[in-house]
Image (spheres, rainbow, N blue to C red):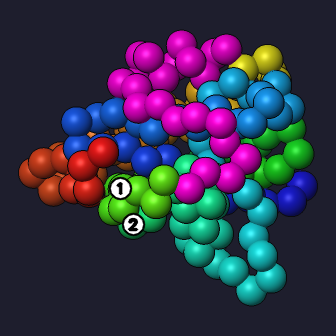
Amino acid sequence: MEKAYGGVVIDEQGHVLLRKPTGHYDGYVWTFAKGRPNKGESPEQTALREVEEEIGIVARIVTKITGSFIGGTTDNEYFLMAAMEDTKRLHETSSLRWANQGEAEKLISETTNRAGRFRDLQVLEAAFKAFWRTADEDNGPIRGAPH
């Protein structure tokens, strides 16, 4: 199975940024930015590029999210990210939404692609574990640009 890499952007208040794919592509209603690497790209470079392309956020990587998450067509790895700049340019995305963890679980559950929904719920849980672990280690939440 091919590898893909993505990013989960969480702000210092504990809100996660979700994307609505244009036309609910492949049954996704709310999901995270991810994609396959271009030739010569590292996992980190791929994830940062996909976040900037799909959700218009220039981000920095805070930490790797533990685990590998199987989707419908790819084996996915994700990075916890902090937003640094909003370019206001979206690709393959019709809208964005900041949500707390509970709201995000409900929104992701709207996805009709069963494998993708299961994967994204797992990613969400792992991302928040990484977020709180990082916040505890740094004596405070991750820092990024305000949204």
Label 1, secondary structure: give it. strand
Q: Residue at x 49, y 47 (%)?
A: 8
In terms of sequence position, does the residue under pointer 1 or pointer 2 come before the other?
Answer: 2
From the viewer's perspective, tell me whether residue 139 is left or right of residue 82. left
Label 2, secondary structure: give it. strand
Question: Of all residues shown, which one is farthest toward the front?
Answer: 88
Q: CA distance from mark 1 to mark 2?
A: 6 Å
Amino acid type assigned to the residue bearing label 1 in the image: Ala
Q: Position of residue 20 (x, y in %)?
A: 64, 32
Question: Of all residues shown, which one is farthest toward the bottom?
Answer: 40
* Quadrant of image for the N terminus: bottom right
Q: Are marks 1 and 2 in contact (CB under 8 Å)?
A: yes
Mark yes or no: residue 99 visible.
yes
Q: Residue at x 48, y 23 (%)?
A: 104
Q: Position of residue 91 (x, y in %)?
A: 68, 52
Answer whether residue 92 is magenta in the image.
yes
From the viewer's perspective, tell me whether residue 105 is left or right of residue 93. left
Q: Residue at x 26, y 57 (%)?
A: 144
Q: Which mark is residue 60?
A: 2
The residue where tag 1 is placed is 82
From the viewer's perspective, tell me whether residue 37 is left or right of residue 120. right
Q: Is residue 44 above or below residue 15?
A: below
* Quadrant of image for the C terminus: top left
Local packing at callout 2 (Cα closer than 10 Å; few below 14, some 14-19, many 20+) is some
Residues rendered magenta in the picture: 89-110
Question: Of all residues shown, which one is farthest toward the left?
Answer: 139
Local packing at callout 1 (Cα closer than 10 Å; few below 14, some 14-19, many 20+) is many
Query: Residue 10 occupies which quadrant of the picture?
Result: top left
